[in-house]
Image (spheres, rainbow, N blue to C red):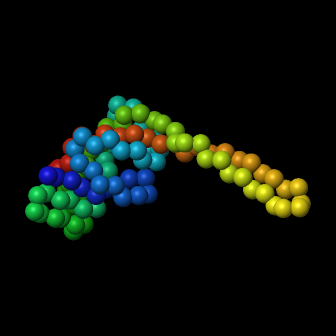
Amino acid sequence: MVYAIVRAGGRQEKVSVGDVLTIDRVPVASGETLQLQPLLLVDGETVTHDASALAGVKVTAEVVEEARGPKITILKYKNKTGYRKRQGHRAKLTRVKITSIGE
């Protein structure tokens, strides 16, 4: 079992080949590939975490689609002053499929 811990969108994600994960929006079109930075590589019993050894490892992902997260409603209210504020937000996301982990 080969898997890697990669940095994706300000977070760390555990990925293996074939996984589909949702990360923060990256400026890459659908169908194109991108490289994710590995922080840890586990290949059976071998665990690699040295930065110089991981420099040669590539985690390749294919962009599946661009999506939007769930709507978040932000309400601010102050009692007895008549202050009310309503605001909404939807995060921009990208779904990627891991195609390869290796050299």
Judged left or right of residue 52, residue 78 is right
Q: How many marks?
A: 0
Q: Horizontal placement of 26 versus 55: left or right?
A: right
Q: Residue at x 32, y 50 (%)?
A: 36
On the image, the x and y values in percent for residue 92 come to: 52, 42
**Among the 4 quarters of the image, the one containing residue 34:** top left
Identify whether 46 is placed above or below 94.
below
For residue 6, which quarter of the picture?
bottom left
Q: Residue furthest right?
A: 81
Q: Position of residue 2 (x, y in %)?
A: 16, 52
Q: Residue at x 34, y 55 (%)?
A: 13
Q: Residue at x 48, y 36 (%)?
A: 67
- Judged left or right of residue 52, residue 81 is right
Q: Residue furthest top?
A: 31
Left or right, residue 71 beside residue 22: right
Where residue 8 appears, x then y in whole percent? 38, 53
Looking at the image, can residue 40 be seen? yes
Considering depth in this image, is 52 or 94 the residue closer to the camera?
A: 94
* Residue at 89 percent of width and 60 percent of height: 81
The x and y percentages for residue 65 are 41, 33
Q: Nearer the viewer, residue 81 or 47?
A: 81
Q: From what the image shows, is residue 46 above or below residue 70?
A: below
As displayed, is residue 24 above or below residue 67?
Answer: below
Residue lying at the far bottom of the rendered structure: 50
Q: Is residue 33 visible?
A: no
Most extreme residue toward the left, as rendered? 45
